Image: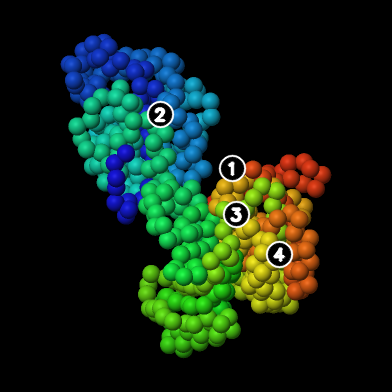
């Protein structure tokens, strides 16, 4: 696979048909040339279209149609073709076929596919359509128009030089499929070279638009592996599910670092930026001490608005005992609403660092507070009008808004209780992606599977109501303020009691299992249940839907 500029973007894929979506070798063009009197190395379509006599031209096409029909009946899907097409559709990309074959031949061949129907393609263009065939770019330009995607964001995939030439002339990206060396050699340079169709998944993962929210964990894991950070002073390195970095300092202290941007809750964004960052510091057992913040404001922001956000940041820092020691402020059209990217540093004595890799088989998993109070509050702050339209009263919405402060999004008190107990093996703050993602991240960071009882997950009625009205799942909704605590099983009851004594609700959610990754969800009766996964946080999906209106 060739390397491309990061500015490239793929929103649609157009496939050649014979030898690309079908196995190569199903049709013998040399035999066809001989049957219609076409010279060797001359394209068959161009030869037939150049026959002056209409009767002879029609006769030649009937011969060609007969060969194509016979080959179509015998054709089979290329290796991995059906799985790839299903993957592209699931990723939200548009797909199409552009071929020098007839529509009848394509429809006949697709009958041999088990999982894919003609209706699964967003566009199919054949020689029956009123466009010059490849290597002319006409069909590709027309297909891009039909897909409502710029040609520059279309990837044309084929096994012959005509596919690559047509794609380049149209301004599209191109992928040459070698079929492990069985395709005709292509002298025209392509943007990507693939030995087999399955390689296209990696290309799409890199160049298709990403959903709003966190970078998907599989991509994050891959990119971090490619970077390969190996500094021996780094006790906790970047990784999926790792909230902080921990660095060994000379002496008896460990420096714990955390950075997180805040893009929601714009009326309380500075308070929020401080809180979510110190939460993660606390999950390591460290004490938050210093804060830096980059504050980005959209054009049109006035000085009073910027000052208010900075004053809020200062007050929030003082309330948490942090020293605001630096940062950056800027008005920029790179953002459409205020963004605060904060970094908090703290320290913890050597030997007191809580590292998720300490999670052991049999450890009990606790959950504090009710789920998704953060998401509920943000939705009430950002979508008040929509909730009123759906029947919520102003009083109900105000109660949801106040959840940001009561019970609040801080997990400091329960994290400190767990750290002081000396029994906590791991802690994880539930943030973007909700509990569903947080448990998967804890599993990934610890290297252990986790069993969860779905019936024990506490959700406020107000959260259920908001999510029900907007079609959201609380399990995938951003949830700072709830903390996952893992502890040795013999210490679970005592730790729950200590947390409840502090006025914070806590429940036993499940337990750590053996080596591996993933979640085993069960009901109270012991029956297994599916564990949901969310490509983006439910609130990011809500914002995306609003912004698209």
Choose between 60 and 108: the one closer to the eye. Answer: 108
Q: CA distance from mark 4 to mark 1?
A: 25 Å
> Is 40 on the left-hand or right-hand side of 356?
left
In front: label 4 or label 1: 1
Q: CA distance from mark 1 to mark 2?
A: 36 Å
Image vertical order of residue 45 relative to residue 461, above or below: above
SS at circle 1: loop
Q: On the image, which quarter does residue 45 sit in?
A: top left
Mark 3, residue position: 358
User: Do labels 3 and 1 touch, CB within 8 Å?
Assistant: no
| Residue 286 in view here | yes
User: Do labels 4 and 1 touch, CB within 8 Å?
Assistant: no
> Is 64 on the left-hand or right-hand side of 445?
left
SS at circle 2: loop
In front: label 2 or label 4: 4
User: Do labels 2 and 4 touch, CB within 8 Å?
Assistant: no
Choose between 25 and 463: the one closer to the eye. Answer: 463
* Mark before the other along the chain sequence, 4 or 1: 4
Mark 4, residue position: 368
Q: On the image, which quarter does residue 325 sit in?
A: bottom left
Tell me if mark 3 has few (under 14), some (14-19) or many (20+) residues whose alpha carbon lies within 10 angstroms of its own: some
Q: CA distance from mark 3 to mark 1?
A: 14 Å
**Residue 516: numbered disc:** 1
Choose between 299 and 505: the one closer to the eye. Answer: 505
Q: On the image, which quarter does residue 297 sit in?
A: bottom left
* Mark before the other along the chain sequence, 2 or 4: 2
Mark 2, residue position: 21
Q: Looking at the image, which residue is at 35% across and 21% down?
A: 24
> Is 11 on the left-hand or right-hand side of 42?
right
């Amino acid at each position: 696979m060739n390397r491309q500029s990061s500015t490239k973007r793929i929103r649609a894929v157009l496939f050649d048909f014979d030898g690309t979506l079908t196995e190569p070798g199903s049709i013998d063009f040399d035999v066809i040339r001989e049957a219609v009197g076409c010279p060797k190395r001359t394209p068959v379509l161009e030869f037939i279209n150049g026959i002056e006599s209409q009767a002879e031209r029609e006769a030649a096409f009937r011969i060609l149609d007969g060969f194509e029909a016979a080959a179509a009946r015998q054709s089979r899907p290329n290796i991995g073709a059906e799985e790839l097409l299903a993957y592209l559709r699931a990723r939200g990309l548009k797909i199409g076929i552009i071929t020098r074959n007839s529509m009848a031949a394509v429809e006949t061949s697709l009958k041999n596919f088990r999982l894919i129907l003609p209706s699964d393609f967003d566009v199919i263009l054949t020689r029956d359509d009123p466009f010059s065939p490849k290597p002319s770019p006409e069909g590709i330009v027309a297909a891009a128009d039909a897909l409502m995607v710029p040609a520059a964001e279309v990837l044309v995939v084929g096994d012959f030089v005509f596919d690559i030439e047509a794609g380049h002339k149209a301004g599209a990206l191109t992928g040459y499929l070698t079929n492990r060396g069985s395709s005709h050699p292509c002298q025209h340079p392509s943007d990507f070279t693939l030995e087999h169709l399955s390689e296209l998944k990696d290309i799409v993962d890199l160049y298709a638009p990403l959903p709003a929210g966190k970078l998907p964990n599989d991509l994050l894991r891959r990119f971090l592996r490619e970077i390969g950070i190996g500094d021996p002073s780094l006790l906790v390195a970047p990784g999926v599910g790792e909230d902080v970095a921990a660095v060994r300092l000379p002496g008896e202290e460990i420096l714990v670092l955390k950075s997180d941007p805040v893009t929601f809750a714009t009326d309380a964004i500075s308070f929020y930026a401080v809180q979510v960052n110190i939460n993660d510091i606390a999950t390591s057992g460290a004490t938050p001490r210093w804060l830096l913040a980059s504050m980005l404001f959209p054009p049109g922001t006035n000085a009073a608005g910027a000052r208010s956000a900075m004053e809020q940041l200062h007050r929030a820092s003082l309330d948490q005992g942090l020293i605001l020691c630096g940062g950056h402020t800027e008005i920029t059209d790179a953002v459409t609403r205020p963004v605060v990217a904060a970094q908090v540093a703290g320290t913890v004595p050597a030997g007191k660092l809580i590292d998720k890799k300490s999670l052991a088989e049999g450890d009990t998993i606790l959950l504090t507070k009710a789920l998704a109070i953060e998401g509920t509050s943000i939705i009430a702050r950002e979508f008040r009008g929509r909730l009123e339209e759906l029947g919520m009263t102003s009083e109900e919405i105000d109660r949801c808004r106040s959840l940001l402060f009561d019970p609040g999004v801080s997990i400091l008190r329960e994290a400190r209780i767990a750290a002081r107990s000396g029994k906590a093996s791991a802690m994880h703050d539930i943030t973007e992606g909700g509990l569903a993602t947080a448990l998967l991240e804890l599993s990934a960071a610890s290297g252990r599977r986790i069993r969860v009882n779905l019936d024990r997950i506490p959700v406020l009625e107000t959260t259920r109501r908001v999510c029900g009205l907007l079609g959201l799942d609380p399990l995938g909704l951003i949830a700072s303020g709830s903390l996952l605590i893992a502890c040795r099983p013999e210490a679970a009851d005592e730790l729950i009691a200590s947390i409840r004594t502090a006025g914070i609700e806590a429940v036993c959610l499940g337990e750590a299992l053996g080596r591996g990754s993933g979640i085993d969800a069960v009901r109270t009766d012991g029956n297994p249940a599916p564990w949901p996964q969310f490509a983006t946080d439910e609130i990011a999906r809500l914002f995306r839907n609003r912004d698209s209106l």
